[in-house]
Image: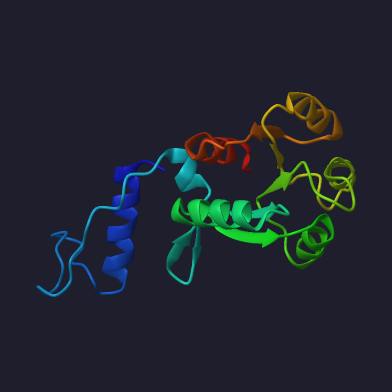
Amino acid sequence: MRRTTLTFLIAVALAGCGLLNATQGTAPDDNVTISEPTAQSDAAERHRVNIDGVLVGAEVLIVDNSVLDRQMLSEELTKRGFRVRTADSSAEGLRLLAESLPGAILMDSEMSGTSPFTVVRTLTTDTRYAHIPIIMLLSQGKDADGATALRQGAQSFVVRPINLMSLEALLHEVLP
């Protein structure tokens, strides 16, 4: 949505609540400040939802057995406006999927237990989950794993160390 359109819609909504004089575009008293919305790309705006008057980004499920990687990705994506849930194993990720569906899944390619590639194949062939884009997180030097991830149904992959701006752009690209 274009910034001017968004500003107009915010003004109309505030006017309806009595917080803004719609004819003059001013606040009804000096204690209320109306500021321009922060600049965001059209893609970022498209993936935000309104929950109780608060704009919140799309939800991303991070499935990674590394506590540090989960924490870093969670913090960085949250700063960038995404809602984040995390799982430390494929089994935990599947349990969280049963509770609610995220907009996208970031899946570590090197986890113990059920192979992440098997999980990707299972999710992408199950009609309940096939629409959810999966991005595999690969270790440096494991480029062949990227081809395997794509063959199993992953939407894309990123190689560590992760460039957070590129990951954010990729998420906005794959989110519905």
Quadrant in which residue 174 is drawn = top right
- Give the x, y percent position of residue 43: 49, 40
Q: From where the camera sits, is residue 48 visible? A: no
**Front-most of 9 and 130?**
130
Q: In this view, does 10 lie to the left or right of 110?
A: left
**Residue sitting at x 50%, y 40%:** 164
Q: Is residue 111 left or right of residue 133?
A: right
Q: Is residue 162 above or below residue 97?
A: above
- Give the x, y percent position of residue 80: 45, 50
- Give the x, y percent position of residue 87: 72, 60
Q: From where the camera sits, is residue 112 visible? A: yes
Screen quadrant of the C terminus = top right
Q: How did the renderer colour the structure?
A: rainbow
Q: In this view, does 100 lie above or below 63?
A: below
**Residue sitting at x 79%, y 57%:** 89
- Give the x, y percent position of residue 52: 47, 72
Q: In this view, does 109 lie above or below 70?
A: above
Screen quadrant of the N terminus = top left
Quadrant in which residue 84 is drawn = bottom right
Q: Among all residues in the image, which is located at the extreme left?
A: 30
Label count reads 0
**Residue sitting at x 30%, y 53%:** 37
**Residue sitting at x 84%, y 53%:** 128
Q: In this view, does 69 lie to the left or right of 130?
A: left
